[in-house]
Image (spheres, rainbow, N blue to C red):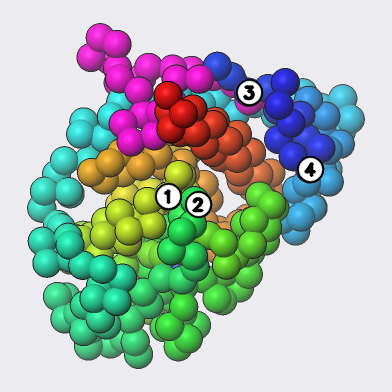
Amino acid sequence: MPSSGGGASVEVPVGGVRRGGLTSAPSGGDRVETQAAVVRDPSIVEVQTQALGVDVYVPRNAPPLRAEVVVDAPPAAVTPAINAAASPAVAANLDWEALRAEVAACQRCDLHATRTQTVFGVGSRQARWMFIGEAPGAEEDRQGEPFVGRAGQLLTSMIRALGLRREDVFIANVLKCRPPDNRDPKPAEAASCRGFLERQVALVDPTLIIAVGRIAAQNLLATETSLAKLRGKVHSFGAQAWPVVVTYHPAYLLRSPGEKRKSWQDLLHARQLFGRLERESASEGRA
Ligand code: URA
C-alpha cells in the first residue's frame, strides 16, 4: 500500500484515471468509477491538519475519514457551452510573454476601468499542480499577484501541507481583474477572461488542477452544482481534459475554520490522485 507521505496511510484504489481524457464512460454513463481513500490513523490526520493551521480535535476512535472519488465523464459533456462561447481566439496560440502582455492590456470588460493592474498569475511554468481561484481581491490588485492577502497565506499553507512550495505550483484566477467591492464575477466577465485561463492551463499543462472555492469551481466546470456536490470527485477542464478537483476557498476556511478538516480531506484526495496520474503518465511514456 503506498504511503501518502507525511505518515498518513492512504488506501490507493485501482487505476482507471488517465490524464488528457480521464477514462471513457463505458456505456454513456457519466460516472465511471467510484473509489475510497481511507485515512487509517486519525491521530496522523490531526498532525497533518495542523500544518493548515487547523485546530481540529480528532478522537482516536473516530471513524476513518472517507473521501469518495468519482470520476466524471470526459469534459465534452461538461463544459461545451463556456468553452465555445468564451474563448477569445486571440489567446489560443500566444506564448507566455505575449499572453501576459495581452492580459495587461485587456479591456474586454468593464473591470479594466476600476483595476489598479491586472493579476496574471504566478509560479512555475513547469508546475505539475495548478491552483485556480476566483478573482483578485484588494491586496492582489495592489500587488499584482494572486493570493497574497490573508486567504492567500492560508492557500500557501495548504500548498505546503501537500509537501509543495508555493513557487513550485502555478496560481491563477478565473478573473484577472478585481471586481469592485470583491463582488462575485459576472458571467460576461468570466467569459471575457476564459481564453486567457485556458491558454495559461495549456502552457503549464499541469497534471492536476485544484479549483479553489465554489465560484472558481463553477466557472471552471461550467456548472451551478454546489461545492458540496463537486467535492470528492474528479472533473476535467478544457481541450485536453485536465483533471480538476475542488476544495473550499481559504477565505471561507478563515470564516469557518471547522471546515478545514474537510479541506484536508480534499487535499489528501488530490495528492493521491496526483500520484496515480503521474505514475500512469510515466508508464504510458514507457509503453
Ligand atoms: N481570492 C481569490 O480567489 N483569488 C485571489 O487571488 C485572492 C483571493
Which x, y percent locates residue 158?
A: 64, 56
- For badge 3, the amino acid type reads Val
Numbered disc in front, either 4 or 1: 1
Left or right: residue 102 versus residue 127 is left
Secondary element at tag 2: strand
Whether ligand 1 has any atom under 8 Å from the Cβ at mark 3 is answered as no
User: Over which residues does the magenta segment extend?
Assistant: 15-39
Disc 2 to disc 4, C-alpha distance: 19 Å
Q: Which residue is mark 2?
A: 129
Secondary element at tag 1: loop
Q: Which residue is mark 3?
A: 12
Which x, y percent locates residue 119?
A: 38, 77
Q: Which residue is mark 4?
A: 6
Left or right: residue 248 versus residue 268 is left
Whether ligand 1 has any atom under 8 Å from the Cβ at mark 4 is answered as no
On whether residue 23 falls in the magenta region, the answer is yes
Which x, y percent locates residue 186?
A: 24, 64
- For badge 2, the amino acid type reads Trp
Q: Around disc 1, counting alpha carbons within 10 Å, would you say few (fewer than 14), some (14 to 19), or many (20 or more)?
A: many
Secondary element at tag 3: loop
